[in-house]
Image (spheres, rainbow, N blue to C red):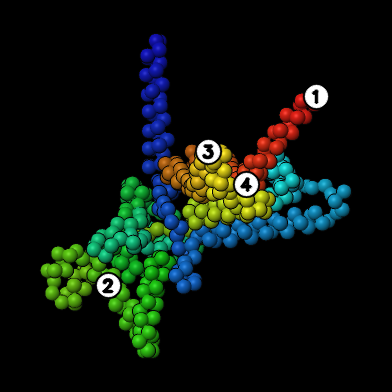
Amino acid sequence: MNAALRGLLVFIALVIFVAVVCVWLPFNFLPSVGAGVALPVISLPAEVLAGNILPNFDFTNTMTSLLLVDALLILAAVVVGRAYRSAPPDRFVPRGFTNFIELIGEFLYNQAYNLLGKKTRAVFPLAASIFLFLLLGNWIKLVPGFESVGLTVCAEYNVFAPETDPEAPGQLGYRVSGLNAQGQPAGILTLFNSDNDGDGVFNLSERTGQRVVRANTLHCEEKYSWGKAPLAQAMEDRAIAAKRAEVEAKGEKWTAEKEEKARKEYHNKQMLKVLTADEKAALGSEEEKLEAAKKKIEAADPDRFTLVPFFRGMTTDLNLPIALALIVVVMVQVWGVQALGGGYFFKFLNLPALGKLRKKPMGAIDFLVGLIEIISELSRIVSLTFRLFGAVFAGGVLLVVLSFLMAFVLPLPIYFLELFVGGIQAYVFAILTIIYASQAVVHHGDEEHGHAEAHGHKASH
C-alpha cells in the first residue's frame, strides 16, 4: 500500500469520525435520549436579575457572583486566621487548606520581594488579594450549574433599538416544555426540548434558537404574566417613575389610578412600535392603530424563552476588570508618591529636564519621554482590562459551543484548559500589579546608584 492510499484511508476515517462525533451524536442521538443541549444565549452585558434596586441601578447576575466570591474569601480568611491563632508561631504547622493558602502567599511574596525588596510589605496585600479574588472568581464559574440555573423568561427583542424599527431582532428564543400560563417556579433548571411535537424529528432551529422580534416578546409577556424579563420590567418601572416625577413636579398628587393609566399608556406605546411607518400612515385613529398592532402581536409566536442565570462569571462583566485595573493604576501612583514624594510626578512631566536645556539640550528628549510615560500609564488600564475580560469571556463561549456540539466528553479538556487559564489570568494580573509598583517606587537615579555600587564591588575584588 503506497503512501497516497494510506493517506486516503486516514482522510476517510477522519471524515467518518467528524460525521459521527460532530453531526450524528450532537444532532440526532443525544437529542433522542434527552441529552442534547440547546445553544444558550451568549450575552456580552450581564443579565439583569432585579431592576431598580436603587434609583437607576439594576442588580445583575455578575453581582451575585461577586458577592458569593467575597463571602467565600472572607470565610477563608476567618478559617486561616483561626488556624494561625490556634498555636504559637514557633510551633504552628499548617495543614490542608491553610497549607495551600500559605503556599500561594509564600510564592507571591517571593515574587514581589525579588522586585520590590523592602517595599514589598506595602504592595503585597493588594496583589495577593487580587490574585485570590480572581482565582476563585475564575474557577467558581466552572462549577456545573453555575451559569445554567436561573429564571426562565420571555426572550427579549433588542430593547435598545430605535422606535422606528418595528422588528428589533434580539435574543435567541427557545420553546420550553412543561410551562403554563398560570405560573412557573423560578430558579429551576429548565431543559430545552427540540422535539416539541413528539414525532421523533429534532428540529435544529429549536436547539440553536430563533431570534425574536418585538411582536414575539410582547405576545409572550401577555400570555405568560410571570415571564416578563427583569430588564423589561425595570425599563417600564423607570418610565412610570419619570411620569410620576413629571406629575408631582406640577404639584399634583400621584394616585393608583394615575399609575394604572400610565402603565396602560406605556403598554400601548410598546404595542404601536410593531407597526411600520407605512402601516401607521395607512391607519386613521389611534384605536385603529392599536387594533392592528394587537392583531400583529397575536399572530406572532409567543412561546420563545431564554434563561437568565442566577450566577455568571464575574470577570465576564467588563465593569469588574476595568474597576480592578483602575484600582491598580491609582494605587501605583500612591505607592510612587509615598516612595519618592512629589518628585515622582517628574517621571511624567520632567520639568527639571526643561530647566537644564541650556546645559543639556538632550533634556528635551527626556521631557518627551515623560509625556509618552503618561500614555503608557493610561494604556495599562486598557491592557489589564481586556486581557482579563477577553480570556475569561472567550473561554466561556468556547465551553458553550462545545457543549452544544457534544454534551459529554468533548468539553472536558476545555474545562481543564479553563482551570489553567483562570489561574494564569489571576497570576498575570497580580504580577503585573507588582511590576508596575516596582517601576513606580524605584527612581531611575536609584538604579544608576545601584549599578555604580555593583561595579565598585566587582573592582574591589
> Which numbered disc flags the more N-terminal residue, 1 or 4?
4
Residue 151 or 252: which is nearer the viewer? 252
The answer to which image quadrant residue 287 occupies is bottom left
Q: Amino acid at mark 3?
A: Pro
Residue placed under numbered mark 2 in the picture: 269
Name which residue lies at 13% across and 71% down: 283
* Residue 440 numbered mark, or none: 4
Residue placed under numbered mark 1 in the picture: 461
Give me the C-alpha separation between circle 2 and circle 3: 69 Å
Q: Amino acid at mark 4?
A: Ala
Residue placed under numbered mark 3 in the picture: 361
Q: Position of residue 183 (x, y in %)?
A: 42, 69
Give me the C-alpha separation between circle 3 and circle 4: 26 Å
Kindly report which numbered mark, 1 or 3, lies closer to the viewer in this rendering.
3
Q: Amino acid at mark 1?
A: His
Q: Position of residue 119 (x, y in %)?
A: 71, 47
Q: Are marks 1 and 4 in contact (CB under 8 Å)?
A: no
Quadrant that contains the N terminus: top left
Name which residue lies at 45% across and 60% down: 47
SS at mark 1 in the image: loop
> Which numbered disc flags the more N-terminal residue, 3 or 4?
3
> Which numbered disc flags the more N-terminal residue, 1 or 2?
2
